[in-house]
Each structure stands twice: as structure tokens, then as C-alpha cells.
Image (cartoon, helix red, strand yellow):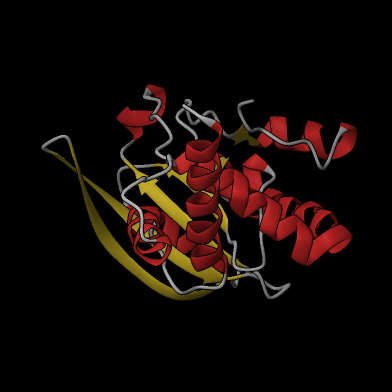
Amino acid sequence: MDVDSLRLRKRIAREAASLLYFGVEKEYKQAKLEAAKIVKSKFLPTNFEVALELDEIAEENEASARKERLIQMRKEALKLMQVLKAYKPLLIGSVWRGTIYYDSDVDIVAYHDEPEDILKILNQNHLKITRAEWVTVTKKGKSKKSFHVYAQLPVNEKAEIKIVPSLEISKKEKCEIYGDEIIGLSLQKLEKLLKENPTQRFVPS
């Protein structure tokens, strides 16, 4: 690809990232299509290219406060995962990656066949639940159902807990943004990370 094409691609990726960062668009696909329309081009960057630009925009706008917030969000994730310890919780999303921005929340996967059990435990621990619902996602013609709990954490951060069947604990999914495997952080690994390298990032190079 020539230099002009690369510049154009970067410009569209930057525009798409800007649309996502400022909340004009919520989904990568739509942001890329809208960015291409704005720039008047048919080029569509990859999700990975847009994610890199989004990370840069967040760094430019949030500076050192971003790292402090990342540490705080990881600490809050740890507390929540300790509550859900029996369900093999896994920290995923931008708090795992280390790529948070102002609109990020704490994303946790828990493995259990009865979502009501987890809801009960969250309520017993006085977590402020704002919404709970079944979500169906279709990928490559296959539909997968999971139960999502949305909550407000004590430090004014948001959390989303995705409850999936226990049989899926050994299954790994491919990240639609970065293209790698979603490994995440277990409770033990998160504890270790917070002691040794609390701002470590998990982004493919």
C-alpha cells in the first residue's frame, strides 16, 4: 500500500475513533462507515487500527489521570471478583487490556448455570444493580445466549457482569477488535498484577 493510501486509512481510523470517543457512535462498524463517509472515501480501516487511534485520543485527552483510574478500576474489579469467587470470574474488556477511556466500565465474565444465584449474591453484597437481562448474540449463524447484569460500583464506576453456562469455561473467544484470543485475568492473576505491575497493558503489537 502506498504512502497516500496509508495516510488516508489512518485519517479514517482517527475519524472513526473520534466518533467512538465522543459518543457519536457506539459500534466500531458504524463508526468506520460514518468516518469513511465524512472523509469521502471507500477505504475502511480494521478494528485494530481504529482501536490504536482511540487509545491515542484517550491518552491525549486524559493524560496521567488515565493510569490512576486504571489502577482504581482494577482494584474495584478485584473486589467484585472476590464476591463472585465461586464462579471463576474473569476480567476482560478495556480494564483487562489497560486501554480504558472516560466511558469505560468494568467487564467481568462469571460461569454459572443459574443467573439468579449470582444476582442474589450481588444483592446480598449491596451492589447497586441498574439492569439485568438476557442477551442473544449471533456470530457466523450461531446464536449464543448470556445473562448480563449492569451495576453501579461504590466509586461511581460502572460494571457489566456477563454470566455464561459453566460448560463454556474452557472455551476461548477471538476478540473482534484486536484479533487475538480473549485471555483476560483471573482473580489470582489480577491480585498478582496489582502488586507487581498495576498499569500493565495486554494489547497485541
Residue occupying the point 41% across, 51% down = 162
Q: Can residue 81 be seen in this view?
A: no
Residue 84 relative to residue 28: left or right: right
Q: Is residue 100 above or below residue 187?
A: below
Residue occupying the point 42% across, 63% down = 149
Q: Is residue 204 visible?
A: yes
Question: What x and y, as percent, mark residue 59?
Answer: 76, 56
Question: What x and y, as percent, mark residue 186?
Answer: 61, 33
Residue 51 relative to residue 149: left or right: right
Q: Is residue 31 above or below residue 84?
A: below
Furthest toward the top, the residue is 170
Foreground pick, 11 / 52:
11
Please tell me in which quadrant of the rendered image residue 194 appears: top right
Residue occupying the point 56% across, 72% down = 22
Question: What x and y, as percent, mark residue 50?
Answer: 51, 47
Residue 70 relative to residue 36: left or right: right
Furthest toward the left, the residue is 141
Please tell me in which quadrant of the rendered image residue 73 appears: bottom right
